[in-house]
Amino acid sequence: MIGMSAQVNLKGLQNYTKNLTKNLQTAVDQTTLIVQGVAQRNAPVDTGAMKASIFSQTSRSNGLATAMATSTSLNKDVNFYAPIMPLLPFEGNVYVGASYGKFQEYGSSRNRPTFFMTRAAAEVQPQFRKLTELAIRRSTA
């Protein structure tokens, strides 16, 4: 009778998976902050409270407290609305805390839409692609 055995070392695969997870989460975190910055840059400004109320959340960070403090210091009449949800890994959200932010984004019977959040997401999309590609390349090194 002929016998055969084989050993498989999965340590390299485990290291790759660990590095890939860390690097992709970093790419998501970076992209989320970039979208936040672009949205703040594009946001219409009257008192600056809405612009200051824009914040981001990832599975590793949350800027809600800072946004609330800054926007209410600029305009005490700002109603802050932020439906914070628990996030999964590789997920990032950018919020407008000022309750009237949705009317600035999508318009109303009194004003035209500005799409400052939509434009921010679209503008940053190519950067996200590059960051994820870089994360994958770094994971194999």
Image (tube, rainbow, N blue to C red):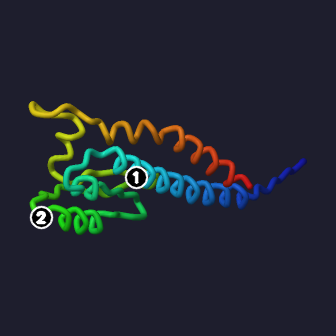
* Amino acid type shown at disc 1: Gly
Q: Quadrant of residue 85?
A: bottom left
Cα distance, mark 2 to mark 1? 23 Å
Seen at 20% across and 46% down, the residue is: 101
Q: Residue furthest front?
A: 46
Left or right, 20 with respect to 91, comes to right
Q: Which residue is mark 2?
A: 76
Who is closer to the viewer here, 110 or 62?
Answer: 110
Q: Is residue 36 above or below residue 15?
A: above
Q: Which mark is residue 37?
A: 1
Q: Is residue 3 above or below residue 71?
A: above
Label 2: few (<14), some (14–19) or many (≥20) C-alpha neighbours in 10 Å: few
Q: Is residue 68 above or below residue 118?
A: below
Residue 69 appears at what percent x and percent y?
A: 23, 69
Residue 30 appears at what percent x and percent y?
A: 49, 55
Seen at 21% across and 35% down, the residue is: 106
Who is closer to the viewer here, 97 or 28?
Answer: 97
Label 1: few (<14), some (14–19) or many (≥20) C-alpha neighbours in 10 Å: some
Residue 7 appears at what percent x and percent y?
A: 79, 57
Seen at 17% across and 55% down, the residue is: 81
Left or right, 56 with respect to 98, comes to right
